[in-house]
Image (spheres, grey):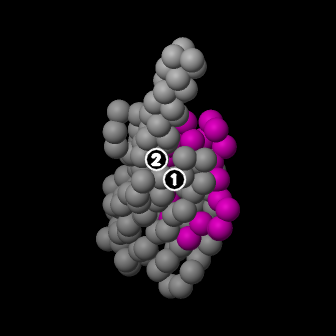
Amino acid sequence: MKWTHSLAKGSAMIAAFALGACAGMGGGSMSVPMSGSQEVPPTNVSGSGTGTITVGSDCAVNASITTQGVNGIAAHIHEGAAGANGPVIVPMKKQGDNQWVTDAGAKFTPSQCDAYKAGRTYFNVHTAQNKGGEIRGQIRPSGSGGY
């Protein structure tokens, strides 16, 4: 009986620790400044923006971008390290003149979630003048696990 109680107590402690670790990922939103200087190659533009992202413990993504002085035609979350370009992993849709949002139900794959945790994802807004991207913001989750 004592052994069963200890096993149950130990299992409960492990479950609580695991839930606590995952809760940090969905624990709040992160604000990401965006500028032309972060683009690859850099753009010499005066426009800017702010991306906001929340990633749930199941890798569900809720994100938005608000721009100032940028006539955006597309916006995305890309996978790529700072200083490197990468593929689109989450498209965003325009919602108003200076606002972009992810679709409900957007989700990273497990490998994309790992890239997010490691700081290898970024926001990007494209314009007619800068089709490859006018402003960019590298997403750098804080904490030792990248959460």
Mark 2–mark 1 Cα distance, whole angstroms, equals: 10 Å
Quadrant in which residue 113 is drawn: top right
Q: Helix, strand, or loop for circle 2?
A: helix
Image quadrant occupied by the C terminus: top left
Is residue 96 in view?
A: yes
Name the residue type under label 2.
Ala
Question: In this rendering, would 56 be left or right of 111?
Answer: left
Q: Is residue 67 left or right of residue 46?
A: right
Q: Nearer the viewer, residue 13 or 82?
A: 13
Q: Is residue 108 magenta?
A: yes
The answer to whether mark 2 and mark 1 are in CB contact below 8 A is: no
Residue named by callout 1: 55
Per the image, the residue denoted by label 2 is 23
Q: Residues within 10 Å of mark 1 (few under 14, many from 20)?
A: many
- Give the image location of residue 94, x and y in percent: 59, 77
In percent of width and height, residue 146 lies at: 41, 38
Classify mark 2: residues with Cα within 10 Å, few (<14), some (14-19) or many (20+): some
Q: Is label 1 in a helix, a strand or a loop?
A: strand
Q: Label 1 is placed on what type of residue?
A: Val
Which x, y percent locates residue 6? 49, 20
Q: Residue 107 in magenta?
A: yes
Per the rendered image, the range of residues in magenta is 101-127
